Image (cartoon, grey):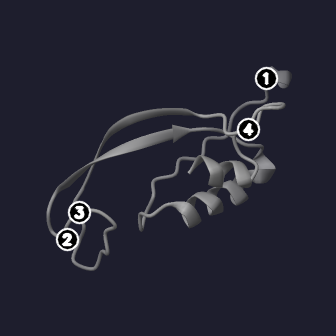
């Protein structure tokens, strides 16, 4: 995922790429009858180990980064939060 994000311009600070904060957790979900889960079974509550990735990009690169995540992620519906931040230079 970090390679996909970086290839679209995300997670870059100066001369550093792939910048992110990650942590593990357990994802829980119950696929409905019309779902095609990558992991787990339809109609059952499933629990899988997952990584949460927090990273950033310039507003102008947001669409490309989200598209890159969707293209690289194996889940039908990856959860992607997009949170616009304040520019610290304007505070």
Q: State the SS at label 3.
A: loop
- Tell me which numbered mark, 3 or 1, is placed earlier along the sequence: 3
Q: Residue at x 83, y 31 (%)?
A: 15
Q: Residue at x 64, y 50 (%)?
A: 3
In the rendering, which numbered label is found on residue 40? 3
CB under 8 Å between discs 2 and 3:
no
Q: CA distance from mark 4 to mark 2?
A: 38 Å
- Tell me which numbered mark, 1 or 4, is placed earlier along the sequence: 4
**Discs 4/2, front:** 4
Q: Is residue 9 left or right of residue 74?
A: right
Residue 84 percent location from the top left of the image: 67, 40
Q: Is residue 81 above or below residue 16?
A: below
In the rendered image, the residue lying farthest to the bottom is 34
Q: Which residue is mark 1?
A: 88
CB under 8 Å between discs 2 and 1:
no
In the rendering, which numbered label is found on residue 17? 4
Q: Residue at x 32, y 75 (%)?
A: 36
Mark 4 Cα within 10 Å, few/some/many (few <14, many 20+)? some
| Quadrant holding the C terminus | top right
Q: CA distance from mark 3 to mark 4?
A: 33 Å
**Discs 2/3, front:** 3
Q: CA distance from mark 2 to mark 1?
A: 46 Å
Mark 2 Cα within 10 Å, few/some/many (few <14, many 20+)? some
Q: Quadrant of residue 19?
A: top right
Q: Which residue is mark 2?
A: 42
């Amino acid at each position: 995922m970090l390679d996909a994000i970086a290839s679209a311009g995300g997670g870059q600070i100066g001369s550093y790429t792939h910048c992110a904060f990650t942590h593990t957790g357990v994802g829980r979900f119950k696929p409905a009858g019309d779902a095609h889960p990558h992991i787990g079974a339809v109609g059952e509550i499933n629990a899988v180990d997952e990584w949460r990735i927090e990273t950033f990009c310039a507003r102008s690169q947001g669409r490309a980064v989200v598209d890159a995540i969707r293209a690289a992620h194996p889940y039908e519906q990856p959860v992607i939060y997009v949170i616009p931040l304040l520019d610290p230079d304007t505070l």
